[in-house]
Amino acid sequence: WHLCVGELRAECRSREGDGVERLAICRGLLTCCRKDLLVCCLDNQEKTVLLEGLFPIISALCKENLQCHYFVFQALALWLKCVKECLRQLWGARGTPLLKEDSSLCQQLVQVIWNSAESPVEGVAEFVHSSFRLLLEIYELEWQHFQDGEKRLYFSLLNRIAALPWEAKVKYFPLCALLPYVGTNVVLEQFPELPHHLLKCLSANNLSPCASETYKSLIQQQRMELCRDPSCKTAPPSEQDLAVKWAQRWQPVLLKALTSKTTLLQSNASNHLLPWTLRTFPAAFGLLQTLLSIPAAGHLRAWACLMNVQRAVSGSWPLEDRSSWETLRLALCSFDDSVRLAALNLICCSPKTREPPAPVEFTMLRQFLPFNLNSESSPFRQQLQAAVRKFLVRVRDSCLACLQDRSRVATEHTDGRMEANPVLIQGA
């Protein structure tokens, strides 16, 4: 039988009509055919091989239940990439935007992408996400070229996202893709409940990656918008000003997660939300530290997690004043196992394994161990052993570093004696 793509007639002799023969020809044209042939008009009409020839075949393959869906959606992404590269020629041939909101092409593309966003086939979701981003890029380029009124497609997609329940994974990837085009203010005005939906997602293992990625995209976009704010004409905003703006939207949500009694929510907030917050808005550390320095179990655990993350992000010891040391002592003596473990990790763990423990860290660990080695909780003992092992690795590596670089840590006397090094003495 013959496959017709524009004026091309290809004779297909396949053993099974499984769609692979159509896919192979479409992929071959997209990767090997000259772009000027793909966009040239057929029979003096506005029809082109790229739009009217290839797209109907690829969209039909996307809707069929085939065994080669991975390659089908790879071809869809290639087709969109090719359209983006040929936009100027297509505009010249048509004189109108390709992706008007009410156009058949736009509606079919959105529907194909939407229907396959949660495909269980490995690798398909990545091509679907890539296709959606390319669709938005093409729409933005067309809007900039034609200046065609409001960006109605974005708001149409936002309304479609809003109609989805918070449990749907498909709700979050298009939201992240739309952020650069509509801005965080528009998104949060359209979805005032979004922060609370993210907390619900963090309470479920299968949805926590979506929530952390969405939160990261939101705060990074917020920082970009604040730094490009036209009202700041004299000087860019300071880190403290940026942190205050972040706190107005996100501080209550993050505090609720960090002090939650739900272990999974508290753990995911500490492991995902908190690191991205401190990387994106470094001055947020001071705001959070002030609010968490309260001798209550939930606040002490959150305070210890905050200090751990700050140490990992900045690479420096976060406790600088006496009140912080007192808070650490309270955490080490807490009745709550999770609070004591969080405080212990602050003492034992460091992003640099060669960083020698401070004398006060040795002292606190010596005071902590006798009262906690006989705990009846097996998970507590396992985490205690892991933390102490990390502490001993720091001691060993810092001592080895001193021995390997004696010229920096010791001075040789004329009689051949070596001055004692405090790191070596402490490690011994």
Image: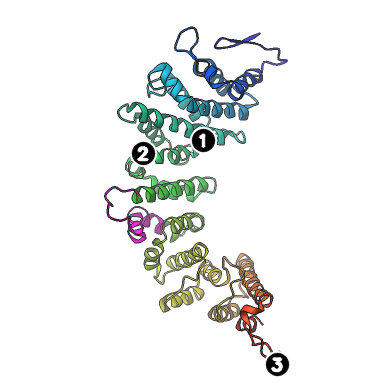
Using the image, tell me which numbered label, if any, was put on residue 415.
3
Write down the region rendered in magenta: 228-256
Residue farthest to the front, as pictured: 414
Q: Is residue 417 above or below residue 365?
A: below
Q: Position of residue 394 (x, y in %)?
A: 62, 72
Q: Position of residue 245 (x, y in %)?
A: 33, 55
The alpha-carbon separation of the residues under discs 1 and 2 comes to 18 Å
Secondary structure under badge 2? Answer: helix
In this view, the mark in front (1 or 3): 3
Give the residue at mark 2.
Answer: 182
- Distance in Å between CA atoms under marks 1 and 3: 71 Å
Q: Residue furthest top?
A: 43
Q: From the viewer's perspective, is 292 left or right of 405?
A: left
Is any part of residue 114 visible from this angle? yes
Position of residue 411 in the picture relative to residue 36 (left or right): right
Which label lies toward us, 2 or 3? 3
Dominant SS in magenta: helix
Cβ–Cβ under 8 Å for marks 1 and 2:
no
